[in-house]
Image: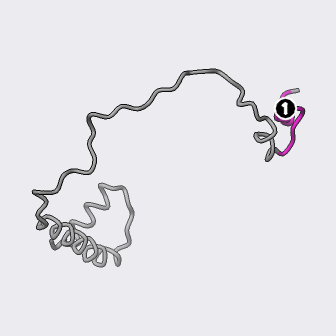
Amino acid sequence: MALDRATVERIAALARIEIAEEEADALAAELGAILGWVETLNEVDTADVAPMTSVGGHSLPWRADEVNDGGYPDRILFNAPDAAGAFFAVPKVVE
C-alpha cells in the first residue's frame, strides 16, 4: 500500500507527533512497506489453526486477604538510606 506525503502528515497530526518536512517522504516509504508486509500476512491460510489464547473460560485464583507486615524488615530496609529500628528514617519536613 503506497502512502503519500499528505497521508503521513495527517497520521502524524492524529498521533500528535511532530515530524520534520524532510522526514515525511521517508516515513511514507517506511509506513508503506510496513502496511505491505501486513497485507502479505492476510494471504496466510489459518483456517485449520486453532487459536492459542482465549478471553473466556478462565478464572484467576484467589488468595485470602490477610493483613501482615511481611515478617522481614531487615530485607525491606536493606537499601534504605537511613533506618531507625524496623522503620524508615526520613528528614523532618515540618517544624
- Which residue range is magenta in the image? 81-94
Q: Would residue 82 be found to the left or right of residue 12 on screen?
A: right
x 30%, y 78%: residue: 26
Q: Nearer the viewer, residue 64 or 28?
A: 64
Quadrant into which the N terminus falls: bottom left
Q: Would residue 22 be found to the left or right of residue 7 on screen?
A: right
Whole-percent x, y for residue 49 in the image = 16, 56
x 87%, y 41%: residue: 82
x 79%, y 35%: residue: 73
Secondary element under disc 1, as helix, strand or loop, is loop
Whole-percent x, y for residue 84 in the image = 89, 34
Whole-percent x, y for residue 83 in the image = 87, 38
Q: Would residue 78 be found to the left or right of residue 24 on screen?
A: right
In the rendered image, which quarter is residue 81 located in? Answer: top right
Quadrant into which the C terminus falls: top right
Q: Nearer the viewer, residue 82 or 10?
A: 82
Residue 89 covered by magenta stretch: yes
Residue position for label 1:
86
Type of secondary structure dominating the magenta stretch: loop
At label 1, the amino acid type is Ala
